[in-house]
């Protein structure tokens, strides 16, 4: 059997498969179905300084080969994540988990990351810069290289854990933002977050989503994600986590050829709760088919 | 929760737009009336949530209205298998019903009350049922509830059958110990106001997963935030906060 191990920012993963933030909760819904210790790791629900209810409902819309969500970062806040969710997770997951962090100001990010830095269970901090900057006129941190770099620096200053900056695809030049984060000290880049989308109900002539717009993800965005992962991986020398529309073992290999060290799976978990388990089981067969002995050998194989 | 394949054994039309599908398969994850299943359909990304109408050790019955692509596709299936997630949501708690509960359903809110009525009757309770529809042609399951031994009243908005008006018109002057209901939110709210007992109300929301992972279906309640798919779809009267 081929070797599935990869090294993500100094921590070895049994395989590169990582359920993406917001699609795996804090793990226990899936632990009811299978032993989640088979995963490389997983990225938990986007956590903020204070508790958030998120957006009004409907928050979900069906699309061809995908979905739109406008959950709006509902989470119990970092203190409850630390005092309630993580101890519960420890009962079903004995690996390092990836902490996904969101914020609405540079100080928010730094505060939340500093709290999570103290937690042994947390292996990596995945910093989602797709959120609006309340002090910057509401523009997303992730659309401006300087703002993304500022968040990166602020987070790096409060933690010794690897910092992975998660980028938004809703930008003109994703490479400029990735490079700015690398220069600011990021240990890795993950991409892509959801693409801004919208659906309209023909009967009511109103947007399906209460928030009007939301994040489009799922199978349909895979080609865009592969392109962006490729562009960023070509431009930076830190590890890249690829995601966006991954739904099978072949997609994982494709993402890795594009330059991904590890691969996150999002929306597919929601419609097929066994998606990650199936992918992990299928990977050795697909590797054999394409004559891959060490999965880590193919990272960035496409020049 | 369980994911498994079910075999379609029957799919019949009950009214112009309402169908009943019977399936055989592993129902071991279904533990209470008022829970729901989430159905994968060919060519559609999200699963479709549908309430359990009835179940036993190896068969499941659902009743659904054709409203869009997914339910349209279901209505055309005469045989074959469906990938279904079962055992979703909290369901109705029958312990709180008292001796003579009333069950109130409107339109496609009627189906989950059937297995609930069955369970309550098996516990020796005297069950009243109010079924609300727009018009006579839309009525289904009146006879089935009667066959269980329920005291059934039907209301139609246009007065073409039974009591003219809304389900709340049938509640007037009625004696009951507890209220169970399912239907459109304006109906639930009207029952909430008209009912003089405690009760359990079943809600709908657009769902991403149906099993608690995505936070797509959250609502605010007196006792905090709840996921309709996990801590719902059934809420107790005392915890409901109305948004409409
Ligand atoms: C817990 C629960 C139990 C339900 N039980 C029943 C039942 O027993 N019988 C029945 O006929 N219907 C029931 N519904 C409603 C049913 O889920 C929708 O009618 C169905 O999903 C419509 O799918 P479609 O593809 O035909 O419609 P489309 O409009 O094409 O669907 C588009 C998207 O919107 C979602 N959607 C549309 N209407 C609703 C709705 N009312 N509630 C939630 N999501 C919706 C669909 O799931 C899909 O993701 C229930 C809904 C919930 C949440
Ligand atoms: C319901 C839902 C919630 C999400 N919540 C978060 C979140 O809290 N933080 C985050 O960084 N990304 C979040 N995402 C984005 C995913 O992690 C992922 O980047 C994106 O969906 C693309 O992957 P996919 O196509 O495999 O879903 C969410 C996605 C979905 C579908
Ligand atoms: S639908 Fe995903 S949490 Fe309820």
Image (cartoon, helix red, strand yellow):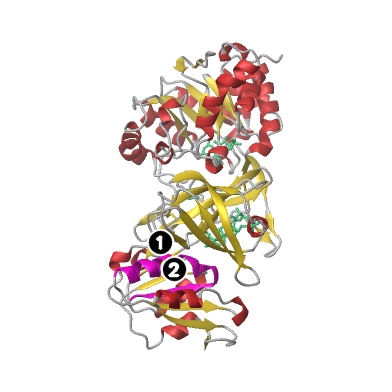
Residue A157 vertical position relative to residue B22 in the rendered view, above or below: above
| Tag 1 residue | B33
Across and down, in percent, residue B120 comes to 34, 69
Q: Is mark 2 within 8 Å of ligand 1?
A: no
Across and down, in percent, residue A225 comes to 66, 30
Q: Quadrant of residue B181?
A: bottom left
Residue B100 vertical position relative to residue B20 in the rendered view, above or below: below
Q: Could you say which is closer to the camera, residue A237 or residue B140?
A: B140
Q: Earlier in the sequence, mark 2 or mark 1?
A: 1
| Tag 2 residue | B113
* Chain to which the residue tagged by mark 1 belongs: B
Dot 2 alpha-carbon crowd within 10 angstroms: few under 14, some 14 to 19, many 20 or more: many
Across and down, in percent, residue B195 comes to 38, 78
Q: Quadrant of residue A98?
A: top left
Q: Could you say which is closer to the camera, residue B114 or residue A23?
A: B114
In-image side of A112 versus A62 (left or right): left
Q: Residue at x 60, y 70 (%)?
A: B14
Residue A300 vertical position relative to residue B99 in the rendered view, above or below: above
Across and down, in percent, residue B218 comes to 46, 53
In-image side of A297 versus B218 (left or right): right
Q: Could you say which is closer to the camera, residue A157 or residue B121?
A: B121
Dominant SS of magenta comes to helix
Q: Quadrant of residue A111?
A: top left
The kind of secondary structure element at disc 1 is loop
* Chain to which the residue tagged by mark 2 belongs: B
Q: Quadrant of ligand 1?
A: bottom right
Dot 1 alpha-carbon crowd within 10 angstroms: few under 14, some 14 to 19, many 20 or more: many
Q: CA distance from mark 2 to mark 1?
A: 7 Å
- The magenta segment is B101-123
**Is residue A50 on the magenta stretch?**
no
Disc 2 vs disc 1: Cβ atoms closer than 8 Å?
Answer: yes
């Amino acid at each position: 059997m081929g070797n599935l191990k990869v090294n993500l920012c100094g921590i070895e993963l049994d395989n590169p498969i990582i359920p993406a933030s917001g699609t795996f909760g804090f793990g226990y819904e899936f632990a009811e179905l299978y032993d989640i210790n088979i995963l490389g790791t997983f990225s938990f629900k986007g956590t903020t300084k204070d508790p958030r209810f998120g957006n009004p409902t409907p928050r979900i819309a069906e699309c061809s080969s995908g979905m739109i969500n406008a959950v709006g970062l509902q989470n119990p806040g970092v203190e409850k994540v630390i005092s309630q969710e993580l101890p519960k997770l420890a009962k079903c997951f004995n690996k390092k988990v990836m902490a996904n962090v969101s914020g609405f100001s540079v100080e928010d990010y730094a505060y939340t990351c500093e709290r999570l830095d103290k937690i042994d269970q947390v292996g990596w901090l995945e910093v989602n810069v797709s959120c609006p900057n309340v002090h910057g006129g509401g523009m997303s941190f992730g659309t401006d290289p300087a703002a993304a770099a500022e968040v990166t620096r602020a987070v790096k200053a409060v933690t010794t854990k690897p910092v992975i900056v998660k980028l938004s695809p809703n930008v003109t030049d994703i490479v400029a933002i990735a490079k700015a984060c690398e220069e600011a000290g990021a240990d890795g880049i993950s991409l892509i977050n959801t693409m801004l989308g919208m659906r309209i109900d023909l009967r009511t002539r109103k947007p399906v989503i209460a928030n009007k717009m939301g994040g489009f993800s799922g199978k349909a965005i895979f080609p865009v994600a592969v392109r962006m992962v490729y562009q960023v991986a070509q431009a930076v020398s830190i590890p890249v986590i690829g995601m966006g529309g991954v739904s099978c073992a072949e997609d994982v290999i494709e993402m890795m050829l594009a330059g991904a060290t590890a691969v996150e799976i999002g929306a597919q978990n929601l419609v097929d709760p066994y998606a990650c388990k199936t992918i992990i089981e299928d990977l050795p067969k697909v590797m054999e088919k394409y004559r891959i002995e060490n999965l880590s050998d193919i990272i960035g194989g496409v020049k | 929760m369980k994911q498994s394949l079910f075999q379609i054994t029957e799919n019949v039309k009950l009214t112009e737009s309402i169908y009943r599908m019977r399936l055989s398969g592993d129902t071991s994850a279904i533990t209470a009336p008022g829970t729901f299943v989430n159905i994968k359909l060919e060519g559609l990304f999200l699963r479709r949530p549908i309430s359990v109408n009835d179940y036993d050790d190896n068969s499941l019955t659902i009743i659904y209205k054709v409203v869009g692509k997914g339910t349209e596709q279901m209505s055309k299936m005469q045989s074959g298998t469906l990938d279904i997630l079962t055992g979703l949501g909290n369901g109705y708690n029958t312990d709180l019903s008292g001796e003579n509960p009333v069950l109130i359903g409107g339109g496609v809110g009627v189906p989950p009350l059937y297995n609930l009525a069955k369970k309550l009757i098996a516990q020796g309770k005297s069950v009243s049922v109010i079924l609300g529809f727009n018009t006579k042609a839309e009525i289904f399951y009146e006879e089935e509830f009667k066959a269980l031994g329920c005291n059934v009243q039907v209301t139609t908005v246009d007065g073409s059958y039974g009591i003219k008006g809304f389900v709340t018109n049938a509640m007037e002057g009625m004696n009951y110990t507890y209220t169970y209901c399912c239907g459109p939110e304006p109906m639930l709210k009207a029952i909430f106001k008209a009912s003089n007992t405690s009760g359990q109300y079943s809600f709908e929301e657009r769902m991403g997963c149906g099993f608690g992972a995505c936070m797509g279906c959250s609502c605010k309640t007196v006792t905090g935030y709840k996921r309709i798919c996990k801590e719902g779809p059934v809420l107790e009267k005392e915890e409901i906060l109305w948004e409409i």
